[in-house]
Amino acid sequence: MAQTSSHDRLPDDVQSILDDLRARIRKYVIVEGVSLVVVVICGLFWLSYLTDWAYFKLSRLELPGWLRTAFLIVMLCSLVGGAVTWIAARLMRRIRSRALALVLEKRFPELDDRLITAVELAENGQGDDTPFTSAMQRRTITDAAQTARGLDLESVFDRRPLKRALTGALMLLVSIAGLGIADAASVGRWYSAFVLGRDNYWDPFRQSALEVGIVAQPGDRFQQLTTDSEYKHPRGADLVVRVSVPDDKVVPEQVTLHYRTVGETGSSEGRVTMTQVDDQTFRHVLSRAMDDHQLWVVGGDFTNRLPYRVDVVDPPRIDAIALDCDYPAYTGMNAFADQQVPVQGTQVSLPIGTRFVMHAEANKPLLGVRVRSPLFDLSFAKGSDSDADSTSDQRSAIEDRLVIKSTETDEVMTYSLSSEEVQHLISEDGLSFELPLVVSPNAAEQLAGWDSTDAFALPVPPDIPLQFELHDADDIRSEEPVRLTINGIADLPPVIETRLKGIGRSITRLARIPVEGTIADDYGVSTSQFGFRVDEAEQYEFAELSEAPSGEKSFPLGGSDPEATEPFNVRPLELSLGQKLTLSVFATDADDVTGPHESHGEVYTFRVVSNEELLAILYDKELNLRLRFEQIISEVTEARDDLSAHREISREVERLRAIEQPTAEQREQLTQSNTSLAVCADRRLQSLRKNQTESQAIEESFRDIRAEMVNNRVDTSTALERIDDGILTPLHQINEIDYPEADQNIALFRLAHEQGQSSSREIQSAIDSLNTMLNRMEGILIEMRRRETYNEIVKLYQSLLEKEQELHNRTKKAHIDSLFGE
């Protein structure tokens, strides 16, 4: 069996020194590694702390969450990495005795390689050495052990890195501890930010706080803004931003509003300094907001981390209104008029008394509607859905009620409306609503006696505007109410247009008064009759027409014949001479809502005269007509003579035109003659047409005289025959035949002259037609003069009667005076 030599293992002294050095190395590694890890972790703490503090001072915001998370991850990774790299990995490394021996040999030269030799001999084990070699090796090991006992192992280590690490670690730990003692809240803030990951960890440390909101219209309603929800704002309305400072916070010297707009046309950014309106309130107006906005408010050490979002949407509006009408029965409109009346603009006209349901279509879902007028204020909300939604709170804030205002006093009556009454007013989808109304002139009285048990139909006065305020699902209310005026079409009294035909203002006791004309009413004439008064009677008496109206909108007096008249007989009244008769036509309509309405036509006043006086009056008319007719004859005669003179001028013009080379004098004469012919043609046409108009008026006047004689019953067959055959028939022939023929001939004369042709033949034709007309006129004038003799006799008789009556009155007066004396 082989024997182990004494140098196969190290002496205990050498092994002890190596083990001690190994332990010291491990302790050094642990202390230094821990110190380095502490330095790194504390350094990261201060870096994150100061970064957070500086970022807040610059931006007044907390660090972004991702950056704080990154800091935390870096710290954890540094902790683990440092522990693994500087402690665990170094401790796990094997420290060999040979390496330790080399360290000692390098540090302590006096070992003279004996220690490393001893370690190597111990590690190599037994060899084939000679006894001398073995003795030398043992000697070497023994010397190494003796020398190692006096070594100072502490001098092997360089303590400066360890001291730096320990110093740094202690300083950083002390600084953090001091911070924790001096400002524990800031350490807590860091813990909340980087460990707990809270977003608002700076809030407890802010000196300023701002409450941001929008002043919404109408009513200057303050709407608080939050970063976790959007505020809906009506497009085109001013965006009024108001910032308030709580009582326990510091009011900043300046508040700045940063905004960003995003729309279809692009985006823009801006910043403005808000105006301080009082001690704790700032305000700014962004005019006519058309695009979505993002808002940031900076004041003192406050700003919002996330933007306040303003979503600009269309405000509620009424796109279309239609009225489902039930017209009053008396109008008859339900049978032929459109019962669905679309509203164009802000006004619509309906007959007074019309009941209708207003159907309105909105551009977006509605929550409630408010209807205002000087007489009432109605509010109603959309019926509750079966499923709860986000607008339930807004809907519950709308109260279903009717407020009635008194026009005479300040009294106000409020009625709560049940859901059954109003739930059908707004459609299920909220895109339309309806309202039953009635046009009533007595709306104020009807509202004062409002009975909620009756069918829901609000009376509205005519011509009073209604204002509609809409509240939509975005909690936006109409900034300007929609106005609608229901103009009431009042059923006016019948319009009566009458004319007397064939009668004057002087009548006999047996007269028959013909009245022609029409009675018109918007919805039909109900009744019509004559109304008359005798002398100064205050009340009218009435007489029925020969044909009564039956609801026609236009009722002709006397029937549908254009020449028909409605006669009023004076004979049954048994009037006396000198009495006064007042006559008019009365009519009423069928209005059973605000009527019936009564009116009358023109009022005619007649004086009752004797037959002789009436004939004298007619004679005066005939005399005036005869004088006018004589003037017409004179003018026609003048026209004929003028044409005769120009007939010779026309022949002279023909002669001058036939000269091939006229002299200057002949040309001058020709020019003057042409001018004279042209002037003559124009002058005679104008005068002839004027004479025709006057002749027609005379004919019509003689027909009126004839009609007055007949209607006053003072006519005789002889007198009528003389008027018809002696005046009216030839005068009608003159107006209808002779005048047009003469006008045509003179016109042909002018045309021939204008064309440069011979006009003498046309002038002769015109002269012949005028001669024929003058012959007839002379015959008519002879008949007029014959009637003058008869009329003068009648007038003389009338004068004798008047003188007799005057003598009778004077005799009667003298007799009375003689009886009573002076």
Image (cartoon, rainbow, N blue to C red):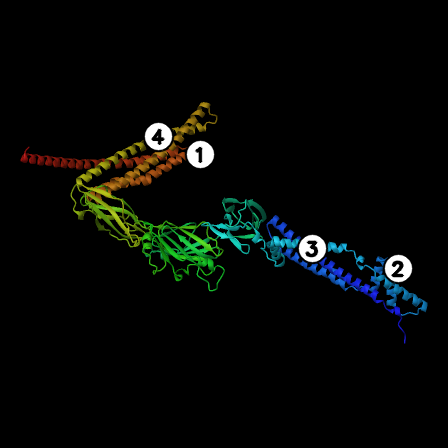
- Distance between the Cα atoms at labels 2 and 1? 162 Å
For the C terminus, the image quarter is top left
Front position in the image: 46 or 322: 46
Contact flag, marks 2 and 1 (Cβ < 8 Å): no
- Distance between the Cα atoms at labels 3 and 2? 41 Å
Of badges 4 and 3, the one in the foreground is: 3
Q: Earlier in the sequence, mark 2 or mark 1?
A: 2
Residue under pointer 3: 170
Residue under pointer 4: 642
- Distance between the Cα atoms at labels 4 and 3? 146 Å
Contact flag, marks 2 and 4 (Cβ < 8 Å): no
- Distance between the Cα atoms at labels 3 and 1? 135 Å
Q: Position of residue 239 (x, y in %)?
A: 51, 48
Front position in the image: 180 or 75: 180
Question: Can residue 361 be seen in the rendering of this structure?
Answer: yes
Q: Residue at x 43, y 55 (%)?
A: 369
Residue under pointer 2: 112
Residue under pointer 1: 755
Of badges 3 and 1, the one in the foreground is: 3
Q: With 100 as the anchor, is 416 left or right in this view?
A: left
Residue 572, compared with residue 744, is above or below; it is below
Q: Earlier in the sequence, mark 3 or mark 1?
A: 3
Contact flag, marks 4 and 1 (Cβ < 8 Å): no
Q: Earlier in the sequence, mark 4 or mark 1?
A: 4
Disc marking residue 343: none
Bin the neighbour count of mark 3 within 10 Å (Cα to Cα): few under 14, some 14-19, many 20 and up: some
Of badges 2 and 1, the one in the foreground is: 2
Amino acid bearing label 2:
Asp
Determine the secondary structure under disc 1: loop
Amino acid bearing label 3:
Leu
- Distance between the Cα atoms at labels 4 and 1? 21 Å
Q: Residue at x 81, y 59 (%)?
A: 152
